């Protein structure tokens, strides 16, 4: 028989085609089974529920061991939209103590939120009260696709020191970007100690893997919890603050605007730090937090502005020892130099009052009696003496300022609380500008 070479060639073409199709199938299978997380995730999500275990946050004590901030449990209602099956919505609303409108609104908000997915747990409702939690827990089997997530909120033993303690709030996208520890729905410290020591207080989150049946109902722990990661409780903190002293100082500042800071001189520890007006720290817990925070933010007396850390106040008489050191160091005065004081300092249009004491007065008794005139005369002599070593008023002023800087004035103290502002020391340029209106060089 004569061989048909054309048919012989076609055989190879068919074989090549079959191999080609087989390769495509193998490649697709490879990507489906090994490479594509989408199918793996959805299969996993059907079978498992990964729950975050929130550890207890560190407790905060005052210097005497008095418990100031502790934890209370709160319960969030979570849902996996894909698992939700038709249920009695009215019964659900009644159990949660919400209206049908609130239910619909919440559902709409949830669907619009960033990172919404029908496969993963979504927060439907936050911070149930213990009573609502009890009611829902009993009926939960009637609402497939819903489960309860326990979390930790703060509770306060004293309604004081809100500005020092700070509070906690749900993380925002910026927090998550800044710190990869956080995930959507976590809570982080906001303001005060809670913010400064967030890393110590928060501990480490755990994970719990639960098995679900085809209807999404929880059947138990995966491998008896062998793959679960237990949470690690946060570390406790002991403050230098005396909470009773803090409460007392706050009571003295009711209806006043200002700040009180008491420091233990031997160690620099802060015993109390009041910023007035203040607010009740318990108003920033729970579901009312957002509303109450906005109210505090709008308040014209600015209770959220920490006056102890951020406001600028004249130093008052406590500044006199510093001024005495500069005058002595510069040789403007010696221990015998005495200045007159007849109930105050009067020069040009300026009058600074003083109480009655012997006159003239030298530096030691001036400090003892806190004489205003002495220190006014001292500074005037330093600035205005034309035959002095400084040459100009501006130079004298600059020297005065450099002494202050060398003693640490004007710098941040480095307190372990957020938002400390630095102090302000005026220099010669500042006074030149300030006095331009009055048309002339400042006279003291
Ligand atoms: Zn005096």
Image: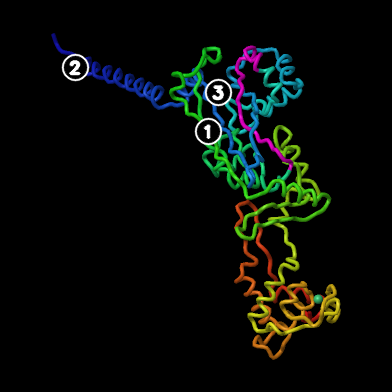
Q: Residues within 10 Å of mark 3 (few under 14, many from 20)?
A: some
Residue 342 as seen in the image, left or right of residue 179: right
Tell me if residue 65 comes above or below residue 343 in the rendering. above
Query: Tag on residue 205?
Result: 1
Residue corresponding to mark 2: 5
Q: Find numbered disc 2 in the image and state the secondary structure of the residue it sits on.
A: helix
Mark in front: 1 vs 2: 1
Q: Find numbered disc 1 in the image and state the secondary structure of the residue it sits on.
A: loop
Q: Residue pushed farthest top?
A: 1
Task: Check if residue 317 falls in the magenta segment.
Answer: no
**Colour theme:** rainbow
Q: Quadrant of residue 359?
A: bottom right
State the quadrant of the N terminus.
top left
Q: Residue pushed farthest bottom?
A: 387
Residue corresponding to mark 3: 119
Q: Residues within 10 Å of mark 2 (few under 14, many from 20)?
A: few
**443 or 263, which lies in front?**
263
Query: Residue 417 appears at what percent x and percent y?
Result: 63, 51
**Marks 2 and 3, how far apart at CA:** 59 Å
The residue segment tinted magenta is: 137-159
Residue shown at 61% from the left, 60% from the top:
266
Residue 348 as seen in the image, left or right of residue 6: right
Q: Earlier in the sequence, mark 3 or mark 1?
A: 3
Q: Residues within 10 Å of mark 1 (few under 14, many from 20)?
A: some
State the quadrant of the C terminus.
bottom right
Q: Earlier in the sequence, mark 1 or mark 2?
A: 2
**Marks 3 and 1, how far apart at CA:** 22 Å
């Amino acid at each position: 028989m004569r061989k048909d070479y054309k048919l012989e060639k076609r055989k190879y073409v068919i074989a090549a085609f079959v191999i080609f199709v087989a390769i495509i199938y193998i490649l697709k299978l490879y990507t489906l089974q090994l490479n594509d997380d989408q199918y793996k995730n959805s299969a996993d999500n059907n079978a498992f529920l990964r729950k975050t275990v929130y550890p207890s946050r560190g407790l905060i004590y005052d210097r005497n061991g008095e418990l100031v901030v502790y934890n209370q449990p709160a319960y969030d209602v979570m849902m996996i939209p894909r698992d939700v099956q038709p249920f009695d919505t009215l019964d659900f609303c009644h159990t949660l103590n919400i209206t049908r409108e609130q239910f619909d609104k919440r559902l709409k908000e949830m669907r619009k939120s960033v990172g919404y997915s029908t496969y993963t747990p979504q927060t439907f409702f936050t911070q149930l009260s213990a009573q609502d939690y009890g009611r829902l827990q009993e009926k939960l089997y009637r609402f497939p696709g819903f489960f309860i997530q326990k979390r930790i909120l703060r509770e306060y033993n004293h309604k004081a020191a809100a500005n020092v303690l700070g509070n906690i709030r749900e993380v925002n996208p910026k927090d998550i970007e800044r710190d990869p520890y956080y995930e959507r729905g976590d809570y982080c410290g906001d303001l005060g100690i809670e913010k400064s020591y967030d890393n110590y207080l928060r501990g480490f989150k755990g994970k719990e893997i639960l098995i679900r049946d085809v209807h999404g109902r929880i059947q138990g722990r995966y491998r008896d919890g062998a793959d679960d990661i237990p949470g690690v409780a946060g570390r406790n903190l002991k403050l230098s603050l005396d909470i009773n002293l803090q409460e007392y100082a706050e009571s003295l500042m009711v209806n006043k605007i200002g700040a009180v800071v008491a420091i233990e001189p031997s160690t620099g520890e802060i015993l109390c730090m009041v910023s007035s007006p203040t607010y009740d720290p318990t108003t920033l817990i729970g579901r009312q937090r957002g509303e109450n925070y906005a109210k505090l933010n709008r308040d014209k007396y600015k209770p959220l502005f920490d006056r102890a850390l951020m406001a600028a106040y004249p130093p008052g008489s406590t500044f006199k020892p510093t001024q005495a050191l500069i005058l002595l160091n510069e040789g403007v005065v010696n221990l015998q130099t005495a200045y007159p004081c007849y109930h105050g300092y009067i020069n040009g249009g300026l009058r600074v009052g003083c109480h009655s004491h012997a006159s003239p007065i030298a530096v030691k008794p001036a400090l003892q009696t806190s004489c205003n005139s002495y220190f006014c005369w001292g500074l005037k002599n330093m600035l205005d003496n034309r035959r002095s070593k400084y040459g100009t008023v501006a130079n004298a002023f600059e020297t005065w300022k450099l002494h202050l800087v060398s003693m640490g004035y004007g710098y941040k103290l480095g307190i372990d609380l957020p938002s400390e502002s630095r102090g302000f020391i005026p220099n010669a340029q500042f006074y030149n500008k300030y006095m331009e209106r009055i048309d002339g060089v400042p006279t003291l």
